[in-house]
Amino acid sequence: MKKKELRFNLILMLILAAEIALSMYFTYKYGMNNVDADNSSEMVLSRLLADEGTFFSRNWFYSTELRVLNTQIVLSLLFRLTDNWLLVRTLGSGILMAIMVCAYLYMIRETGLGRCGKAAACVLVLPFCQCYQQFALFGLYYIPHVTISFVTAGLFAGIIKRHKGWQIKAVLAVALAAAAGLGGIRMLVVLYCPLVIAAFLLNYRMPACIQDIWRNIPAAVKTRAFVYSFILAAASGIGFIINTAVLSDIFTFKSFNGTEFSDADIFGRSDAILNGLMQFFGYKAGRRVMGPGLVANMLAVAGIVIAVYVMWTLIKKAELTSVYDRFIVLFFAADFCVNMFTFYFADMWEANGNYLIPFMMWLIPVFVIYINYKGIMTACGRVVAGLLAAMVVINSGMEYYEWKNTDINPGKEGIVKFLVNNGYERGYADFWDANVFTEYSQGQLKMCNIRTFDESFAALEWLMDKSYTEWNGDSKVFIVVDNAFSWENRDTLSYLDRRYMVASNNEYCVFAFDNDAQLAQIVERGKHRQ
């Protein structure tokens, strides 16, 4: 028996290693063709942190979160070992994926989901949908969120079991919750609030729980699971309070203190949410109806139907599963409902496929629980497992194929070579291009994000080194403008006279100036001309 288990674990490790290696290969070989502004901002920040020798910077415009437990912990350390940006991105992706897999396997061990649960780890490092590939496996941003959730669930299960060493797990879980809260409100929404709800509901059994809910509240709030879930949520809440009251005065990031309830546009938001769910299951617009895209998109629809069926079955048959199985199912249900509430009624973040990643990843252990419950040898177990496996494999294959044959950055490499070879260092571009140009140049170009190129010429203080906004009268500067944007806004860009243009291709035009003072004068003259 031990030999069989050892053989299974060895084969699993080899498969996972091969999948991670394949993802790293595609990152190294084709990553620069697919990098976008959000992806590049992670690298620019990591380079800044490495230069400053810290993990946080006052010299960075953060977005909605202060990066406390995030990709920069790994990437900034790698930048201290090498100046090769592509190598840092490639090695960083492999390390972060390995950490996420280890966190998942730890959770599986603590919750007792068995071989099927272990085998499902292979899904974590496959690009089963475009948003997961772009924002997790390649962009890396959501890997820490998913990892924290898995580690917390594993520690929480260990605390509930109260086996040897549970006190240490409790301390680690509280520390992790506080650190997660320091980063902002997101982990409270996607992890700790749903954790409290799931722990509370764990005391009830369907369908009787609806009838007895008020009578059983005193007992529910006294359970070990609820008490410790509340402690973890409180620790995360304290971290968030520190984030809001203290760290917001030290670092620059968007605070959600002023979040308001949005218009109750139920139908409009339902469209966005449905599109986001379809994207997460691998649906992709633009694929040909007569081709492999038909199979992939139909499997995405089937995936949503299967998810609804599986959740309904597991909640209805809760008494037939273990306490840890029920906890995971209830946690996903609570997580889904809490996030749907924010999508429908609060202007916090949009219901795009990428924003669903931190909580929808919990469908993986939920599917495992269903297959374990039905049995892999039963008809239901085989059908569900087969359809899900087909969805993951086919979508992953198509994503790799499309990744290989897609270039969302045509023209950038030539522009960067011209600028670097001619001694340019400081420039301006819109948000969607600025950080990407910096990464393409291996950090040699310092690009300021511009909110608008009209007469105000205002900087967009978002995911950028603050020093890039400082005007310097001594060095030559340049502006890179997308040709399509330039044509559409030719009236407001009239100050960019062609005599200042030093390079162009099918995608971009480059305008150069002696210094910022000259640029300011030209912008001002353009303002008076309009």
Image: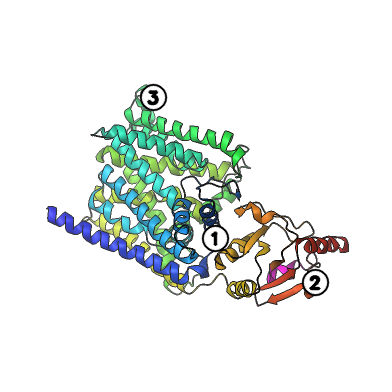
- The tag on residue 40 is 1
Q: Nearer the viewer, residue 431 or 500?
A: 500
Which three-letter amino acid code belongs to the residue tagged 2? Asp
Q: Which residue is mark 3?
A: 217
Nearer-N-terminus badge (2/1): 1
- Secondary structure, mark 3, is helix
In the rendered image, the quadrant that contains the C terminus is bottom right
Q: Is residue 217 left or right of residue 505?
A: left
Residue 231 belongs to magenta span: no
Whether residues under marks 3 and 2 lie with C-beta atoms below 8 angstroms apart, the answer is no
Is residue 251 shown left or right of residue 330? right
Kindly report the distance in space between the C-alpha atoms of the residues bearing marks 3 and 1.
49 Å
Q: At 39% from the left edge and 33% from the top edge, which residue is drawn?
A: 229
Closer to the camera: disc 3 or disc 2?
A: 2
Label 2 element class: loop
Report which residue position mark 2 lands on: 497
> What segment carries the magenta color?
481-492
Identified by mark 3, the residue type is Ile
Q: Nearer the viewer, residue 427 or 181?
A: 427
Q: Nearer the N terminus, badge 3 or badge 2?
A: 3
Instruction: Using the image as rendered, state which of residue 104 and residue 335 is in the foreground.
Output: 104
Q: Nearer the viewer, residue 435 or 126?
A: 435
- Secondary structure beneath dot 1 equals helix
Residue 8: name its quadrant.
Answer: bottom left
Q: CA distance from mark 3 to mark 2?
A: 72 Å
Q: Earlier in the sequence, mark 3 or mark 1?
A: 1
Is residue 101 visible from the viewing direction of this image?
yes
